Amino acid sequence: MTTFRELGVSEPVVRALAERGIERAFPIQVMVWEDARAGRDTLARSRTGSGKTLGFAVPIVERLDPEARPLPAALVLVPTRELARQVAGETEDIAAARGLRTKVVYGGTRVREQGRGLDEAHVLIATPGRLQDLLERALVRLDGVRILVLDEADRMLDMGFQPQVDRIVRRLPRERQTMFFSATLDGAVKRIAEAYTRDPVRHEVVGEGPTVEEAEHRFLPVDAHEKVATLARLAEAEPGLTLVFVNTKRAVDELARKLRARGVRVATLHGDMTQEAREKALRRFEAGHVGVLVATDVAARGLDLDDVSLVVNYDPPSDDKGYVHRVGRTARAGRSGTSITFVTPGEQGDVSRMAARLDLHEEFEQEGMKVAPPRIVFSGSVRGRRSGLRPRRPR
């Protein structure tokens, strides 16, 4: 593997990366380096967790002049607060190594407090909604932006941020570098990328589309009235951290209440919580003070939780992409991990078709199960009796 020094990254940035134990570049970082560093518009496709953040952060800090004015000079748009904080955490130290300042803004905090000091930040990392708030209040100017990055662009569109992004882009100078980093570069993402860029170069890590290969996948038949009790048993037996996904914010709070009544230590995470409450919940979860985090899909991307050993889809995701990103919260950084999806009798057809599209048949067969679309044939009963299927400990 190529080191950052071999790529030609400046010594201060190389040292800052080395202090974090990072010396070698991931494939996507190597691929985009020359074009991104040269200021070319760039489209990069690589899956979540493949190192996209440093793929754009390192070229940004190498290109920016600490004496540049007006500021901010670079803008990174991300879809969620958690991803904004993660990108800021990976960017701040390498930016500081070259005398550059960073600022991160997102919803859930007071607008005017976040608006302070933006004209002194070389790199601004923002969610579209909060940046739009700041623009409307004239708390930030974007006429100095020379580099625009859209990170997790597919997720940004999925969450309905295109109108805000369009308004923001219209405020930017036409003479700028634009970089797209996304797990997909087709459909709506492709159309938007073509509209925002000029003669872009395209980079894709071969074979690194959305994948679920790293985790062990289990599909557990369960009646709706047994789901809470089943989850409580799984959480009690799991020695590591358990991340549970449900489909609505209301369901998060309701499930957490029921789990606490059964003695399960649980925290919650959803979009209606304040940023302070969300950060507190994540700190308690990461520190192991609570073993279970119940969340909506706000936690499916942008959370760097390497120690999650079990992901439970209490509610099956609405689509294949949702499954991939939920499961991607486990089996990270070389660790093992398990995903368990609860499947009620009425959900078997949809889950079976999703499994077929994600090519999970082989894993089912290895576990002694059979797949027969349009339904999954499980070992054990799906109607009220205890299933013969047992989640295994992570390998």
Image (tube, rainbow, N blue to C red):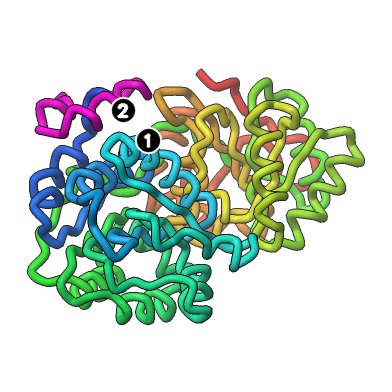
Q: Position of residue 43 (x, y in %)?
A: 19, 59
Q: Amino acid at mark 1?
A: Asp
| Residue occupying image coordinates x 15% and y 72% | 175
Specify whether residue 149 is in view. no
**Of helix, strand and loop, which one carries label 1?**
helix
Q: Amino acid at mark 2?
A: Ala
Rate crowding at label 1 as few (under 14), some (14 to 19) or many (20 or more) other CA atoms within 10 Å.
some
| Residue occupying image coordinates x 20% and y 46% | 59
Q: Position of residue 192 (x, y in %)?
A: 27, 74
Specify whether residue 215 is in view. yes
Label disc, if present, on residue 16 of the rendered structure: 2
Q: Which residue is mark 1?
A: 93
| Residue 3 on the magenta segment | yes
Q: CA distance from mark 1 to mark 2?
A: 6 Å
Rate crowding at label 2 as few (under 14), some (14 to 19) or many (20 or more) other CA atoms within 10 Å.
some
**Of helix, strand and loop, which one carries label 2?**
helix
